[in-house]
Image (tube, grey):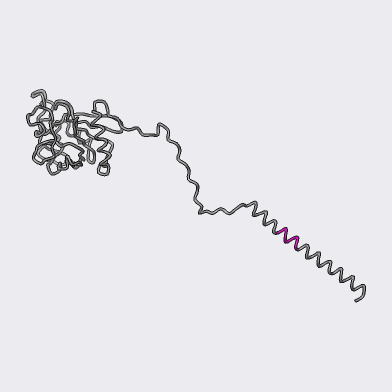
């Protein structure tokens, strides 16, 4: 090969080297651009990744519900027992806004049936008679409770107001006893009804009310009012201190 051919071969070699070098540089820059783009985009976000839980907002004093307190004229001890019964029998008592408390501690001439609205704290009270078996000497005071059939006694504990019917005392309301101390209420036909011997004029004539056969007998003028306030599915609690 002559000198001229050698020189031409060297120039061709140099040109091919430059072309290869440029391609390598371009390839490297392209990779860098991709690398920069990845760096700018950041790591991929997994849409299935669970979000961090949001902590609950702290309760303010106004947001914390206050426990009900006994309205004026209601014996606190019995009121708290009634609330405890409302909680323990909660699965059976559908309506929890209003309760009735039969406080048989006082003399029968005193209003002893108290219907209490737990939402606004209002209370309505009226006369109610107790059973003759609970007051054999007719002293006007309830001396004892009983759940025994044919005892004619008032039973103690939590009752569930049930359906209405018409019987010998007119419109009446059945009760279901929820405790061992009154679970014979349905079999004994212990109900709420109106009766002449529970009217206020009995106090004027005899100084006390008459006696029932264990039922919660209220004055005839107040019967429908009691039924309207209680309705079905609410608590009636009977007791004394």
Q: Tell me the residue at 88%/71% (across/down).
A: 8
Q: Whole-percent x and y of residue 51?
A: 50, 48
Q: Which residue is drawn at 92% across and 75% down?
A: 2
Q: Which residue lies furthest to the bottom in this view?
A: 1
Q: Which residue is drawn at 24% across and 34% down?
A: 81
Query: If the image is split into quadrants, where does the N terminus sit?
Result: bottom right
Q: How many marks?
A: 0
Q: Is residue 27 rendered magenta in the image?
A: yes
Left or right of residue 239, residue 62 in this image: right
**In magenta stretch: residue 218:** no
Along the line of sight, which residue is nearer the eye, 47 or 67?
67
Quadrant of the drawing holding the C terminus: top left
Q: In this view, does 48 lie above or below 3?
A: above
Residue 106 x/y as whole percent: 16, 27
Quarter location, residue 207: top left
Relative side of 47 to 93, left or right: right
Q: Position of residue 69 (x, y in %)?
A: 29, 30
Instruction: Tell me which corner region of the image, top left, top right, bottom left or bottom right, holds residue 89.
Output: top left
Name the image quarter holding residue 221.
Answer: top left
Magenta stretch: give its range.
24-30
Q: Residue at x 78, y 62 (%)?
A: 22
Image x and y of residue 123, in percent: 25, 29
Which secondary structure type mostly characterizes the magenta part of the structure? helix
- Most extreme residue toward the left is 137
């Amino acid at each position: 090969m002559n000198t001229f051919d050698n020189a031409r071969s060297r120039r061709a070699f140099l040109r091919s080297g430059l072309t290869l070098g440029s391609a390598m540089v371009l390839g490297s820059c392209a990779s860098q651009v991709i690398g920069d783009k990845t760096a700018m985009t950041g790591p991929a976000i997994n849409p299935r990744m669970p979000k961090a839980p949001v902590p609950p907002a702290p309760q303010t004093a106004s947001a914390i519900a206050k426990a009900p307190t006994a309205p004026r004229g209601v014996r606190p001890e019995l009121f708290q027992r009634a609330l405890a019964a409302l909680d323990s029998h909660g699965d059976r008592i559908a309506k929890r806004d209003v309760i009735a408390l039969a406080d048989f501690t006082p003399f029968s001439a005193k209003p002893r049936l108290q219907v209490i609205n737990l939402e606004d704290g209002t209370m309505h009270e009226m006369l109610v008679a107790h059973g003759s078996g609970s007051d054999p000497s007719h002293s006007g005071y309830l001396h004892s409770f009983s759940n025994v059939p044919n005892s004619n006694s008032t039973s103690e504990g939590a009752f569930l107001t049930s359906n209405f019917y018409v019987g010998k005392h007119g419109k009446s309301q059945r009760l279901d006893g929820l405790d061992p101390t009154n679970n014979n209420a349905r079999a004994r036909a212990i109900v709420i009804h109106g009766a002449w011997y529970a009217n206020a004029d009995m106090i004027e004539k005899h100084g006390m009310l008459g006696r029932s056969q264990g039922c919660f007998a209220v004055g005839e003028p107040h019967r429908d009012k009691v039924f309207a306030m209680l309705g079905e599915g609410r608590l009636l609690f009977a007791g004394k201190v």
